[in-house]
Image (cartoon, helix red, strand yellow):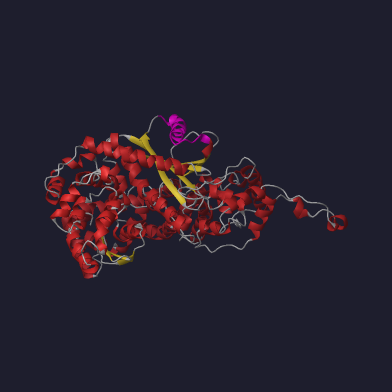
Amino acid sequence: MVFNAYAAAPAARRRREKVGGGGDGGPAAGLPVDRRKSKVWNYYAKLGDAYVECNICKKQLSFHNSTTTMREHLVRKHGIRDTLLSHLKDDQGTESDSAGPENAGKRCRLTPENGFHHPPEPRSEVITELVVEMIFRDLHPLSLVKDKGFGLLLGYLEPGFALPSPAHLSGVLWHRYGALKQQLERYLGTAQALVLCVESWASQFHQSYWSVTANFIDGEWRRARCLMETQRAKAQGMLGEKLVALLAQFGLSGKAVFCLMHDGATTEVTHGWSEVPCAARTLQLCVKAGLEVQEVEEALAVARGIIRYFQQDPKATRSLTSKLEAINKSQLKLVADAGARWLTTVEMCETLLELKWAIMAVLEEDPKGAAGVQNLADHQWKLLQDLLPVMRTLKLATAFLREEQNVSISSLLPCVHGVIAAIGQQAEEASAVIKRVVAIVGMELRQRWGLAEEEKLLESPAVIASFLDPRFKEMRFLSPSSRNELHQRVKNMLSQVCGPQSPPVAHFWGPNLDSKAQAGNQAACCPNAGSQSVYDVLLGKDPTENMPEIHQQLENYVVEPLCKRSTDPLDWWKSNERRFPAVAQLSRRFLAIPATVVLAERAFSTGQSLLEHRRALLAPENLDPILFLHQNHDFLEALRNGNERRSRNPHPEPFRGSAGV
């Protein structure tokens, strides 16, 4: 699209000559000067004085001596960004608009002293930038430019272009990384409080890494998830020091963080940060403990042996396929589970039970198969059949946490309590083995999330987050006394968070639209004061006037009707922030805590994602900038463009952006 714009210039010139008369006095006479002012004109033909036409889609736009609308059309409709427009060479398009060789000669003699600038970077530099962008968007190693196939393709598309060396690409890559890191530093500086998530993973070069992600909710109630750094994993006790040093790189101190989430590894809690385990990792451990019941473990081992037999014996596979075709189930395939992903065990049991009769028929017909593989006994088939509803209920919880409105930890405890109640009902009429499985899973869930002791539970950030979620604030899973204690704890937090030294919520890439709300926040933190009235003399002091305003806000929030479960709590708080400014300030902190270290769709996936596969192949020296740009580039660019549109549009559409590793 970028390169075809030059080919469209002659046709554009003919249209302009037809509309404007083409002569020195026509409207097109001043076009070369306009084109030199903005590279946007490489994509447009001027139709008279008030309209332009896009050379790509032929759409006509109004023109009022400004290219803003034209530029936005290219970005939204054709995906041509400002970064490309700023690098495009415009001398070729300008020559196509000349009236003849005389004008071309005059144009060649134009100099900066005459009011014009030299043409920008050549086309080769634009291609180099696009190659770098392909590398970090698709997670390719820099050695890609040495691959023969890539060289042949680019040589055909751009004859004579000299492929840059990996060292040159590395310089361009780190330059873009530095520029984007400055933008992220400015954005993180607007955060009221950060939640750091630490993901541990290993590359195929047998090296361990930590990927540190910052999570927060900004002043516009946008959920931000930005990768700060990927670094080599050192000794476990050094993580706290590494995180403090990383914060300093972005101009932040340890006080900017109030919560740390990890994926199961034991970490040291630094600077008084709260520690929260990843929901995906914790659920994996709970289910794993339940599946270690001896009878279940034996049945699953036999099931895995059956699947391995069909995977390794072509004759048995052909026989199974023919039987499935006869009953119109050829689309079904046997699935082997992976020990580290319990969701694959659910898929294995489902497909195995679905194909039970075909599998048994093949094993009975083939003497070699009956002797070479152990079949499931009748009671084992029945055990897997009874286990499946329990496993599907647990799987349902992962689907719940994948939904956009449920990615916060505020949805976790209501979900966990619902799972415990559901599998408990399923076990009432089940066998003794299934009851043991459910009892173990339920006990693990209660212990790992502190549900067994309500006093300990009240200290969890997940409980406070659920209370600040307008969908779950009734806290039905707590006893009445625990609810009262929770309310009192939240009141104490409000007094601390909304104190006189509490920093206001800043805004990024745009004007401070909530100055009135911030003034309201400060006023809300002060108790009511006033002279004695006739009511005070006759009836005594009004109890509501003795209550600080921030506590009154909390009481009003509690009696507010519950939201629908499909409501995004951030949308609700964005609409009600002015009604409860102090409570909203606290909610912005706790609702920023995610339920999982990585995005929920990847945390609960049944296989390795493309990101996990490709990042494991990257060389250590360029791994950090490639992953940094891969995750943050589009999010920060959309954020900046959204704020620019809001500065022009007083009623912008709601923006909901999130980036994840």
> As displayed, is residue 339 above or below residue 647?
above
> As displayed, is residue 283 above or below residue 392?
above
- Left of 467 or right of it: where is 644? left
Front residue (pair 289, 617): 617
Please report the residue visible at 63 percent of the width from the left and 57 percent of the height from the top. Answer: 557
Residue lying at the far front of the rendered structure: 25
User: In the rendered structure, which segment of residues is drawn in magenta?
Assistant: 235-254
> Can you give x and y, in whole percent of width and height, for residue 298 in the image?
36, 49
Front residue (pair 29, 69): 29
Please report the residue visible at 18 percent of the width from the left and 63 percent of the height from the top. Answer: 11
> Can you give x and y, in whole percent of width and height, for residue 133 in the image?
27, 46
> As displayed, is residue 18 above or below residue 79?
below
Residue 11 sits inside the magenta stretch: no
Please report the residue visible at 63 percent of the width from the left and 61 percent of the height from the top. Answer: 560
Residue 243 sits inside the magenta stretch: yes
> Can you give x and y, in whole percent of width and height, for residue 157 in the image?
14, 51
